[in-house]
Amino acid sequence: MRFIKNYFMTFAAGDIITKISYLIMGAGCFLRGQIIKGLLFLFLQASFIVYLFNFGLGQLKLLPTLGTATRVEVWNEELQIYEYVQGDNSMLILLFSVMTIIIILAFLVIYHLNIKTAYNNQLTKERGGKLNNMIRDIRSLFDSNLHVTFLTLPTIGVVTFTILPLIFMILIAFTNYDQSHQPPGNLFTWVGLENFRNIFWNDPLQARTFVGILQWTLIWAFFATFSNYILGMILALMINKKGIRLKKLWRTIFVMTIAVPQFVSLMLMSRLLADQGAMNVLLGYLGIGPIQFLTNALYARITVIVVNIWVGVPYTMLITSGILMNIPADLYESARIDGANPVKTFTRITLPYMLFVTTPYLITQFVGNINNFNVIYLLTGGGPLSLDYYQAGKTDLLVTWLYKLTVNNQDYNLASAIGIIIFAISAAMSLIVYNMSSSTKKEETFQ
Amino acid sequence: MKTKRRKFSFSNLAIYIILSAMSVVWIMPILWLIMTSFRGEPGAWTPYIFPKEYTVANYTRLFTETGLFNYPRWFINTLIVAVFTCVISTILVLMTSYTLSRLRFRGRKGIMNIGLILGMFPGFMSMIAIYFILKAMGLSQSLTALVLVYSGAAGLGYFIAKGFFDTIPRVLDEAAIVDGANQNTIFWRIILPLSKPIVVYTVLMSFIAPWVDFIFVSVIMKDNYNNYTIALGLYQMITRENIYRYFTQFCAGAVLIAIPITILFIYMQKYYVEGVTGGAVKG
């Protein structure tokens, strides 16, 4: 709102040169002697207009329908063959429309900057001051405006590889871009909230899958987070206990398992635990009949949690080691005098202290586990598959379901809708972290 | 000398036993991997634990039989991608985190909040869109595309490095300004030399990423076998059709890349802990 108000106020207060720069960008600069800067603005304006009229507007015009002309075969009389006549491609229309909108927004920012510069120049002149020349402008980019220089490249990267794709995919959630609407053969179009309605109640199969997977995702995230946290802490306590020797050796043994790439160790585990795998061979020697670690729904769920302990405990051990050292020793001292046993010391002193310090870490872990793709995908592939579910298995999380829908099924609309739901869950959790995390509030404490 | 010996403690003995047992559980899969990589008999499963014959053929075949699975080629691809990714990501991450941590300008909080929100969307969600964008740029299925995917949005991973920069005393900047340094000089001459841990951490983390990711690379490369990276290549060896013949080679290939990564990781574990706990503990 402030921008719009400023826009008109500045126009009223501006002299003729400032008023011209509302129409011709850069006028406020080159008419006042800042030739290069002015021409840069003008060049940006010219290229924007060329882009918009040659390409951008054409795409935006098709955005409401996402294209109507399907690719058709036309009989070519002369050559006696069918020829394809290219029609619209909904996917490209959507992608380029989003791109055009981003470019328009970027241009508006530059336009706003142009007016601000023109007006500031006017004020400087009225005060009888001297305008910056090009060299001083450039010099300021390395001093008072260093943030502009440093953030330009990262911003371009993030806009191209995160924001643009993300907006595109969010919009896809409101279309019917599924396996039977693949352009250019079949166009897709807007369907509003249809996909969300299907997931929540309209389509019984999808709704059943969603509820089942959501439940398992939350159960998994809970157990995966806390089992790792508590066991990792106990491991760290044992290694760091006074009088335990070879601390470095113990630590290195566990760290080694982190260092082996996850896809290797997890693929290996899945072979190890397969129905005819080494684990069952070993159990066979002991006379215990083959256990379906990965093919029985309940066992598979327990297996992934247990294997996740194997994967995650060394991380927690590493991270909690440092914090454990900081627990005030006199707390333990007085507990010992009062005759508390180790279990009581742990539950009454260590655990509360750690929970207090590491809550942000814990919630980050929880969100991380909701999105824990590797462990599930590599270990069970989401299996065992279930006919109750739409394209998913009993150990599938929301993210692995999303992945399968995207890669195997090309149900992009459904996948995007799930992505948005995952975002909502993570955002809710992260909001809690953000409010609790002392490090964001006290970021300047140590400066 | 007897008085100097540690007192025998029952609880310490129990801890030693538990630690040894846990070590065995944690190390066993890795030992099994190494053992299998030397196994003479093919197949994913054997009805016994210890191989009947040992051989190094699994390792040599990785480099000699390159018809179907071109391991050396994948290795070089991954190395190229890793080097470029590492350079670009490190620059982007350091610039972003430094700016957000130590420079003050309008919109700083806003940018940080946007970064936070963007990080909450699952990464796989935009995977397909990224593929289409790269295709529109004419880059699909190339190593350049892969470098862009790994490093393009690296600026978003500013959080850990920012936590580090937050802890450097501001007095240093002020002293430098008195001496006539501009903001750019402060970054290069004063802050960067003090930031070795976080630079090492960022470099190693971004270097390792291409070696262990197989998801993005599978979406980007599709069937272009020549541009596969190690992770995706190895993953192909254990698909249902190939696993019987190539499982032992897979293990050998995995051991070969696990060795350098293990060494790197053990070297940087100190920085890793400092990086991750940096923000959380100091509150």
Image: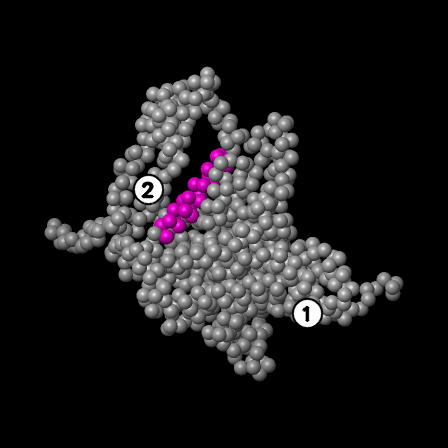
Left or right of A286, for residue A111: left
Circle 2 crowding by C-alpha within 10 Å: few under 14, some 14–19, many from 20: some
Dot 2 amino acid type: Thr
Q: Are marks 1 and 2 on the same chain?
A: no
Circle 1 crowding by C-alpha within 10 Å: few under 14, some 14–19, many from 20: some
- Whether the magenta-drawn stretch holds residue A162 is answered as yes
Instruction: Give the residue at mark 2.
Output: A100
- Whether the magenta-drawn stretch holds residue A24 is answered as no
Which percent across, then down, holds residue A254?
Answer: 63, 62
Which stretch appears magenta?
A: A147-170
Name above or below for residue A143 compared with residue A55.
above
Most prominent secondary structure in the magenta stretch? helix
Q: Chain of mark 1?
A: B
Report the mark closest to the observer, 1 or 2.
Answer: 2
Name above or below for residue B247 compared with residue A292.
above
Which percent across, then down, holds residue A94?
Answer: 31, 48
Which percent across, then down, holds residue A42?
Answer: 35, 27
Q: Residue at x 82, y 66 (%)?
A: B7
Which percent across, then down, holds residue B214?
Answer: 46, 57
Regarding residue A447, the answer to whether it shows in the image is yes
Left or right of B1, for residue A108: left
- Which label belongs to residue B18? 1
Q: Secondary structure at mark 2?
A: helix
Q: Chain of mark 2?
A: A
Quadrant of res A417? bottom left
- Nearest the eye: A421 or A11: A11
